[in-house]
Image (cartoon, coloured by chain):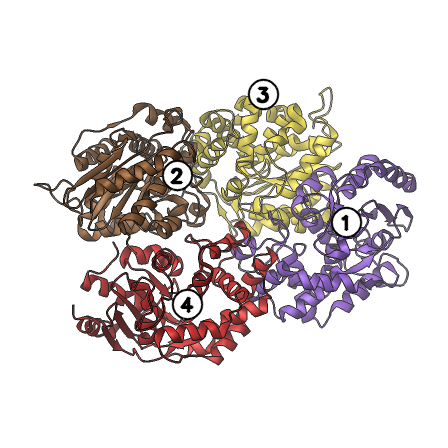
Chain colours: A red, B brown, C yellow, D purple
Amino acid sequence: MNYQTVLDDIANRLAPLLGTEGRVADYIPALARVPVRQFGIALRTRDGVEAAAGDFDTPFSIQSISKLFSLTLALRRLDDALWQRIGREPSGNPFNSLVQLETEHGVPRNPFINAGAIAVADRLLALGLGKHDVLAFAGHLCGEAIAFDAEVAASEAATGFRNLALANFMKSFGKLDHAVADVLDVYFHQCSIAMTCRQLARAAGYLCRDGAHPLGGGFDAVINERQARRINALMLTCGTYDAAGEFAFCIGLPCKSGVGGGIVAVVPDTLTLCVWSPALDATGNSAIGRRALELFTAQTGLSVF
Amino acid sequence: MNYQTVLDDIANRLAPLLGTEGRVADYIPALARVPVRQFGIALRTRDGVEAAAGDFDTPFSIQSISKLFSLTLALRRLDDALWQRIGREPSGNPFNSLVQLETEHGVPRNPFINAGAIAVADRLLALGLGKHDVLAFAGHLCGEAIAFDAEVAASEAATGFRNLALANFMKSFGKLDHAVADVLDVYFHQCSIAMTCRQLARAAGYLCRDGAHPLGGGFDAVINERQARRINALMLTCGTYDAAGEFAFCIGLPCKSGVGGGIVAVVPDTLTLCVWSPALDATGNSAIGRRALELFTAQTGLSVF
Amino acid sequence: MNYQTVLDDIANRLAPLLGTEGRVADYIPALARVPVRQFGIALRTRDGVEAAAGDFDTPFSIQSISKLFSLTLALRRLDDALWQRIGREPSGNPFNSLVQLETEHGVPRNPFINAGAIAVADRLLALGLGKHDVLAFAGHLCGEAIAFDAEVAASEAATGFRNLALANFMKSFGKLDHAVADVLDVYFHQCSIAMTCRQLARAAGYLCRDGAHPLGGGFDAVINERQARRINALMLTCGTYDAAGEFAFCIGLPCKSGVGGGIVAVVPDTLTLCVWSPALDATGNSAIGRRALELFTAQTGLSVF
Amino acid sequence: MNYQTVLDDIANRLAPLLGTEGRVADYIPALARVPVRQFGIALRTRDGVEAAAGDFDTPFSIQSISKLFSLTLALRRLDDALWQRIGREPSGNPFNSLVQLETEHGVPRNPFINAGAIAVADRLLALGLGKHDVLAFAGHLCGEAIAFDAEVAASEAATGFRNLALANFMKSFGKLDHAVADVLDVYFHQCSIAMTCRQLARAAGYLCRDGAHPLGGGFDAVINERQARRINALMLTCGTYDAAGEFAFCIGLPCKSGVGGGIVAVVPDTLTLCVWSPALDATGNSAIGRRALELFTAQTGLSVF
């Protein structure tokens, strides 16, 4: 299949829609001022073939996509012990809801809701890892130096009252071992990482390679096959906030989205893909990104179902 | 792959566990008296190869697996119009909870929770279809005459207070068009259908054949490819009650379970499988059936992820 | 105090507001067609002094005010044993919510929410009492023959899906002993009783007389003093749906309201009062009735606080 | 009535029960080490008659009873404007639940649940008042110098994750104007105030005096009559956590309790009372204190109903 043609076609088709659907996240200034009329898409196959179109080399705030990297980092060290603190079920509630956390005594439903990612950050601290390790890991995966966006990290910390509530709530149930400020420092920084579509398509590559390093060569395995397949399962059932069912239904690929407008998708054994466009729909997922993924699966016939 | 060898091996391995895990559903006498030490498994590939082991020819109460057939029947006629009354998201609550139904004004989260299946039954009535059409459809799919278990249907009706609550609740929100008694008569009867593992493995075959009739030949398509893939997506995200995340994580196949102890699983483009053992775990899914599916995916490497 | 002057003054002051606030209940035709511009008020002191103004002799549908009579009837026979099935706490949720009932396993929070009153009706059946006993009891209390409104009772039954949901839900938790249809037949009929303000002011009189019969003379005590004071406490904390705190705050009297627009209020040891005006505010309480009670307590200084 | 005799009798009757019911709050060491076998009771009538028994002169941590003073301080300055940020309805949930706060977008149900008291603290800061003003106000009301317990305040701050969650959650809804740390500094300190039964019985006296200063003389009114009666109403409907209905039912007086084991009760127009015993029942109210109040109302016949 000529992926470059497919991506070019998607970019062309969606160009007229840029700026017409959804709203850019505006809870912090650094996100609010991102120009809405941007769109990038990039993929990399299991065999290292790459294709990209649009603003694929523009860095954006990866936000919740970082939960993929922190989860992977924790899982490669803790394996199933990680699940003593975090569930694996869809939440059935918006991503930052406290209701379910109360009913379930401080155990987050899965590692992709905010509470779950905060619990993962606490586990990283327990392993002696921190924000710089998440950053280095993501850089190692994509083969390039990447960086935190200091302004974004500071804004997240200054306005992250909901996350402070979640973290303190879990702490009140004895479900965080480290100080809330330390745990959130990891979390707010990982959310502030800036990456491009191309970097993300590369970095996620271990998820279509049974856990092997995306760039191959002399690298060790990132995680084992079983772990990689399970992360894909979590992405499909829980990766796109309260729209996971809708994504599975309409797109049929494991995806992880962020409020920066990025979405990483996996075609198991085949390729990884990243699409980005800043305007979000009502569920907090990139409105145009979602359309791009629908076009991609329709044109390529690639879907896990 | 020699599927018969795989199934024989699974049956042998699980034989010592029969009767040691889980509990038979006991809310109605006809289910409560099913002998616990039974296990059957059957599969049929896309190309018509069959394999089976254990009590694969023993009929059991398909219960919620019938939601697959009623959904398919409604979807082939209504297509996307069906989703005006029913959502497509995981519920995050036990399958018969009213809480989410209240918050979301009588719209069930998906067609596989009880409320959703009741809403599907209401749609069938709106199409001029009824319980006999669901039965005939399931029989048509597996190529054999099947029947309601009249005792089970009567018991369901006599004890189905939770379902009466759900149906009346939806009715109070104006989300059912037909009389509650008529809608539930369809629902209780479809749940009472008795089928064997072999019949179910055959009947579900359209889900691994892009919607084509399982038994091929001169039959028309059951549903189109897009519809078939979407049902698979729904099964994976919502098919096993509140354990859907766990099933995706550990098994990685679209599944639909019932409290009779049956589970139907789909390997897209490859095969359909039915496993049955009456004792249920705490999530309402067959305890041994779940182990059988884990062994199957481990031994065959078949998983959508 | 010259109560007649007070009531006349209230009626005069509120006359211009009739028809300008709130909405008549419209879930059944018989209630929807009640002319909105009506207002009645009546009181009877502990010593038998009566005063009344406006449409105090017009019968209206007492609806949830009947919960007072059914509770009293059950309590006089069961005393504290009644509370094994029903709580005594405010609900914090709208009067017909199922959420709390689910969390608390089918035990209604108090006897004045619908679920609680349905549980009381089940207790009456267990005592060998029925709808005619509730009617006779209310008639006995006010000293006049009163009647069901057959059209209202039939409409309640035909449209009472929410109550059917509540009753079946409790039944599913094993918290109702009798058939749902029988329990709701009592409930729908008691709600359909038609009474006037004067009749209700008289009938509730035992609540300001330590449980003695309102009309005195040779009658036996209705309930004992302790029971009467406890019903007053329940009215204050739970008698006006989700506005009980607001009523306590602004009016400061035990009250029981109904969607027919009536409100019964008690000044312990002093008098009972009934006000009626059909238009309801957003909390389901008579909008003008509430204003009347605020004026009454402001002018008389009568409040339990 | 000879109140001294009544209180002596209550103290005698309850002495054998000390240490046999309930558990001392143990979430901070300073509370956990309070000897359980203590009981004090004190009252002061509208006319200044006092009576007391047991450990009535032993200071204890007033905890949530302080919500009474902070509310009064805010209400005297803001009057009804206070209710723009805080509701007046019973919560129907445990006192520190976040569920209702989420459903109602950060507006606490009433000023006596933790979230409500935190919102009151935010209002005090907006008025230029702080923790020292709450302390001075309570001291002014009882006519004696009182103090914070620095150890308790520090422990509350060090372990108050649930309150941090509540405050950050309200902040995330834009419902707190001041920094969470500043608001909670007020809240944690007010909870740490130590007072005796006698001091509290005196300090609350304005609630049985139409808002006039408890100690009379040349003092200004604390609040006006309307405000005093409304605080009584709030105490009755919301003053004892999730047992408010039970207190109204069994005791029938406006009460405010704290996890230090104190309970302040008001007999409007007659007297204020404070009882203390450290062991708490499952609802967080003093187990023996509750019994003392039941005996008091039974023996004196004093109840608002």
In depth, the one of A173 and D46 nearer the eye is A173
Q: Residue at x 88, y 48 (%)?
A: D55
Q: Nearer the viewer, residue B184 or B240?
A: B240
Q: Chain of mark 3?
A: C
Tag in front: 1 or 3: 1
Position of D267 relative to D156 (above/below): above
Badge 1, how many Cα within 10 Å: few under 14, some, many 20+? many
Residue highlighted by disc 3: C127
Q: Residue at point 50% right, 69% down?
A: A187
Q: CA distance from mark 3 to mark 2?
A: 45 Å
Labels in figure, total: 4
- Disc 1/disc 4 C-alpha distance (Å): 49 Å
Residue C133: horizontal and vertical position, in percent?
57, 22
Q: CA distance from mark 2 to mark 4?
A: 33 Å
Residue B211 position (above or below residue C229): below
Q: In the image, which disc is placed on residue C238?
A: none
Dot 3, crowdedness within 10 Å: few (<14), some or many (≥20)?
A: few
Residue A123: percent from left, percent from top:
52, 63
Which of B94 and A140 lies nearest the eye of the viewer?
Answer: A140
> Label 1 marks which chain's residue?
D
Q: Can you identify the residue that label 2 sits on?
A: B287
Q: Is residue C31 visible?
A: yes
Mark 2 in CB contact with mark 1 (< 8 angstroms): no
Q: Amino acid at mark 2?
A: Ala
Q: Quadrant of residue D7?
A: top right
Cβ atoms under marks 1 and 3 closer than 8 Å: no
Q: What separation in Å lies between label 4 and label 3 (alpha carbons)?
A: 65 Å
Residue C121 position in % (x across, y down): 54, 28
Q: Which mark is residue D261?
A: 1
